[in-house]
Amino acid sequence: MSITDTSTSPTAADSGAPAGAVFRADKRYRGTAETSAERVDTILRALLGAVHQVVSDHEITYPEFQAAKSWLMEVGEGDEWPLLLDVFVEHAVEEVASRSRQGTKGSIEGPYYLPGSRRLPAHCELPRRADEKGTPLSFTGQVRDVNDTPLPGAEVDIWHADADGHYSGFAPHLPEGNLRGLVVTDDEGRFSIRTIRPAPYRIPADGPTGRMIAAAGRPPWRPAHLHVMVRAEGHRQLTTQLYFEGGAWVDDDVARATKPELFLRPVADGEGGLVQRYDFVLERA
């Protein structure tokens, strides 16, 4: 698929709304954050102050204000709040979280994570269709702590788009669990995963989020990447995304989530596929 071809890109109906349903069902986010009334008041004042400043600085008109209200209502009615916030806000929250992190750099989780992926041995192939398209990719590495000690039994929870930029669980034509797996490292903390190189993808563009991006004249594309959550007992969970150096949209990611430390540089394996090693370093919790 050409990166400029939008004919098979996920639609908001296929990807945006299901992201809302998945978020509501995710037990990790049930309840409220333990935040004091004083902190809520401080944050609310700062947020509203910033909005008021934008209105004043840019002399927002009443027609523009009413159009904004209508658009925000459409975001809610289209169940696109998780999509909108993950694309435009999560990178800033992640940057704050990274200030105190040691080890491998983190990145955003995004809206397409699904808990409960199939548990797989350290050396495995991600579940995929028999006729799965795409360049074969062998992704290997080791999970260690900040003292360079291997972490056996660590979990490498990995998921990514297919060669057309679609995610299982959000594109109706894909089988459940396609290109998703929870890989458990061996006695030396190592893993080896056979999969395919994913494609760049356009975020759902037929809903209010996509229309706003188009109105601003910005490209709605994300570069190709692997999503990874790495967990080990007694250690801080790592959530990150790994990108392909020189790939389309790495310098113009709509989610602004790329980092140089997270660029992959795969090499040819001599058999038409690619090989990439990337180690993960976790800090103590």
Image (cartoon, rainbow, N blue to C red):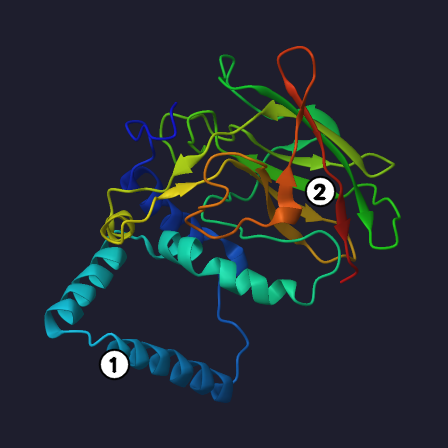
Observer-nearest residue: 11 or 279? 279
Residue shown at 63% from the left, 45% from the top: 262
Residue 55 higher or lower than 165, as above or below: below
Residue type at the position of mark 2: Glu
Observer-nearest residue: 120 or 268? 268
Q: Quadrant of the C terminus?
A: bottom right
User: In the rendering, which numbered label is found on residue 56?
Assistant: 1
Whole-percent x and y of residue 114?
Answer: 51, 43
Residue shown at 64% from the left, 62% from the top: 98
Residue 276 lies in quadrant: top right
Q: Disc 1 and disc 2: Cα gap in Å?
A: 49 Å
- Front disc: 1 or 2: 1
Element at label 1: helix
Element at label 2: strand
Residue type at the position of mark 1: Ser
Residue 253 higher or lower than 81, as above or below: above
Residue 188 lies in quadrant: top right
User: In the rendering, which numbered label is found on residue 155?
Assistant: 2
Whole-percent x and y of residue 240?
Answer: 61, 48
Q: Is residue 240 left or right of residue 90?
A: right
Q: Is residue 190 left or right of residue 55?
A: right
Residue 142 lies in quadrant: top right
